[in-house]
Image (cartoon, rainbow, N blue to C red):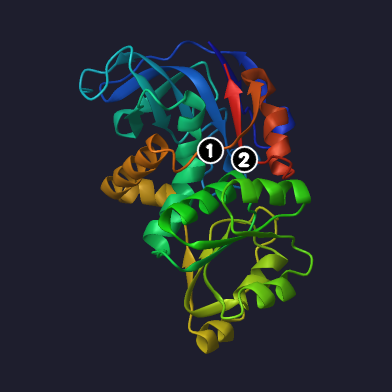
Amino acid sequence: MKAIVCQQYGPVSGLDYRDLPDPHPGPDEVLIRAEAIGVNFPDGLLIQGLYQMKPETPFVPGMEAAGVVEAVGDNVIHVRPGDRVVSLLQLGGYAEKVVAPDAGVFALPDSMSFEDACALMCAWGTSHHALRQRAHLKSGETLLVLGGAGSTGLAAISIGKAIGAHVIAVASTPEKQQACMEAGADLALPYDGLREQLKAHAGRGVDVVFDPVGGPAFDIASRAMARNGRLLVVGFASGEIPKLPVNLVLLKEYALIGVFWGAFTAKEPEAYAANNRELFDWHSQGLIKPRIDERQPLSQAASALQRILDRGAIGKTILIP
């Protein structure tokens, strides 16, 4: 089979596209012939050695793949060969064939495409966990989404609207702001002049901030919080880890909350499975629809990843084996 291999940590341009032996499932594993592979910002960090997890090299990156089951291990009973599934992985997704742990494989409804299924795993899963378990977002609250046109940002907008929040999105260009509005945002703002815009449109403060960006926008958001608000630290796509004047937390009486989706999926599998069921139900009802930004051949994984790292993507990027 063909796969993308990271031989050593470094720029994504150093990835290899080459042949590897076909994998075989263990007793608690599922072998999937991939039809769509999700590309995520953390994949690029992992390859550069900048992510929390640092696997031994060489390795095949990739956290999500959807396709058709080819074989199952002896202990697997909930899926069988021929089933349409999506899988959540730690590694190994950038390949024509993927071996996934049984607990990370989910059967797909007929109405869901392989591409949408990939989008609902990491990006939408992160945003859903952030807003459900970490922020406990409520209908009628105001949600501010930084990095609104990224895959997690667009997901946060749509999930926030599904919950019933008033959503303000922030994105860097008119094209990206339009994408936020198409995802359901009530208002889309640029980063320039954000402090003044928030004063005008959220005078009482923001109840929940979803921040996968970090950098200067974090400081502005931290000063725009409402009492009893929740400021979610999701990531640092800007490359800058901000510092918080903790006196603001005291004076404004809001909470700073970390969001580490990978730990959540490992430590709370039942809650994670319930989250997936809700996302799948919303998708079946037409309440949410992931935006697929581009589709690239598996061989072009490096260029697809670089575009995401450069913040050029709007929504989800999919690799096609």
Type of amino acid under label 2: Gly
Label 2: few (<14), some or many (≥20) within 10 Å? many
For the residue marked with disc 1, what is the amino acid?
Pro
Is residue 277 rendered to the left or right of residue 119?
left
Location of mark 2 (residue): 315
Closer to us: 185 or 12: 185
The secondary structure type at the circle numbered 2 is: loop
Q: In this view of the protein, can residue 283 be seen by the observer?
A: yes
Q: Residues within 10 Å of mark 1 (few under 14, many from 20)?
A: many
Q: Position of residue 124 (x, y in %)?
A: 48, 44
Q: Would residue 60 be seen by someone viewing this image from the given angle? A: no
Q: Quadrant of residue 277?
A: top left
Task: Give the residue displayed 29% in from the left and 17% down from the top.
Answer: 72
Question: Closer to the camera, 85 or 102?
Answer: 85
The mark nearer the N terminus, 2 or 1, is: 1
Q: Position of residue 282 (x, y in %)?
A: 39, 42
Tell me if label 2 and label 1 are in contact, CB under 8 Å: yes
For label 1, the residue is 290
Which residue is depicted at the point 62% across and 14% down?
18
Query: Residue 254 placed where, x, y %?
Result: 48, 79
17 lies left or right of 122 = right
Above or below residue 250? Residue 254 is: above
